[in-house]
Image: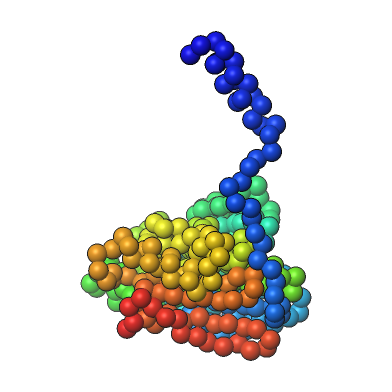
Amino acid sequence: MKRRDFIQKSTAVISAPLIAPQFFQPHKTLPLQGNTSPIAVCTWNFTAANAKAGVALEAGKTALKAAIEGVAVEENNPKNTTVGYGGAPDREGHVTLDACVMNHQGNCGAVLAVEQVKNVAALAYDVMEHTPHVMLAGEGALQFAKERGYTTEELLTPESKKRWKEWLKNAKYQPIINIENHDTIGMLCRDKNGNIEGVCTTSGLAYKMRGRIGDSPIIGSGLFVDNNVGGAVATGMGEEVVKTVGSFLIVEFMRQGHTPQEACELAVQRVLEKQKGKPNFQVAYLALNKKGEVGAYSIHGGFTYMHYQQQKNTGHKANAAYSL
Ligand code: ASP
């Protein structure tokens, strides 16, 4: 390189930070339009959880506080075998929970493979608010929970234990499509200020390998929120959601101008593009934008979601690429 070229190049590099960044496309914030009342949506038919969040929103709570209160209904429910207390254990009999939260400022928190603590969405919130970190896993997350005063208890209920013992007889580890094995609760709320925030909480795949983490606590996969645009949550085979960073992808499609419905369909299509024919796993998405529009779509039929707005809490069936 000639000396003159070198000087020119170095000058360009040195002066670069002084120049205002140029973006290819300006960031567009979707306007709040039409009915601006609070909204809660969640995966599957978690009626009580969604209603709880709706009522909290009406009372003026922030979207994230409302969502954490809402999902706690299922985290505390021993009959729900895929979230919180009573969740199915891993193949060695340990119940390990995953959760994440994201707020309207783009801040987030997550806990992975936590044992003995059922309200892991609240714990993920505490990671966001009270640590300099985004994720805490396993022992460290449990230690943090104890420091924060969380109750610790055995999360394996006698019923879950019985089912696990039954499973052990054959110990077949295969992904299953049906609803019993995919009940992660992902919830998105829009509060009175028009802010969108969300939560995702799960016990993960039933009888998973010890230490296995799915999509649910991974920001961008199980949950993503951009308050300029909207939010998305995922349920189903976490390994497949992670491969296409599903929730982030949906929010980006919405940013490009797609409706939540189109965005969910495009994200499912992205998963299917990598498959040869009909896959034997489920992936399902739910999205909400700033305008309050909702979209949902899954690979296989059977995916449902709840929608709360103006004192109405209604259940809906999502369309699917392959109906049952
Ligand atoms: N997505 C969750 C996971 O992979 C499972 C589910 O939604 O049921 O851990």
Residue located at (64% from left, 73% from top): 291
Q: Which residue corresponds to the image point at 65% horizontal and 83% vertical from the top-left?
A: 309
Asked if residue 17 is positioned above or below residue 249 in the image, the reply reads: above
Task: Residue 92: tell me if it is visible.
Answer: no
Of residues 85 and 250, the one nearer the viewer is: 250
Q: Nearer the viewer, residue 205 or 5?
A: 5
Instruction: Place residue 156 in its image quadrant.
Output: bottom left
Looking at this view, is 192 or 235 the one in front? Answer: 192
Q: Residue furthest top?
A: 3
**Left or right: 307 in relation to 62:** left
Please identify the quarter of the rendering in which residue 118 is found.
Answer: bottom right
Q: Position of residue 19 (x, y in %)?
A: 68, 34
* Image side of residue 248 versus residue 59, left or right: left
Relative side of 228 to 285, left or right? right
Q: Which of 206 and 285 lies nearest the eye of the viewer?
A: 285
- Residue 9's place in the image compared with 145, above or below, is above
Q: Which image quarter holds the C terminus? A: bottom left
Residue 186 percent location from the top left of the image: 53, 71
Residue occupying image coordinates x 65% and y 78%: 39
238 with respect to 149 (left or right): left
Q: Residue 255 is drawn in which quadrant? A: bottom right
Residue at the spot x=23%, y=72% of the render? Answer: 170
Q: Is residue 60 above or below residue 212?
A: below
Q: Where's residue 247, x and y in %?
A: 50, 63
Identify the colour scheme used: rainbow
Task: Please say if 13 is above or below 288.
Answer: above
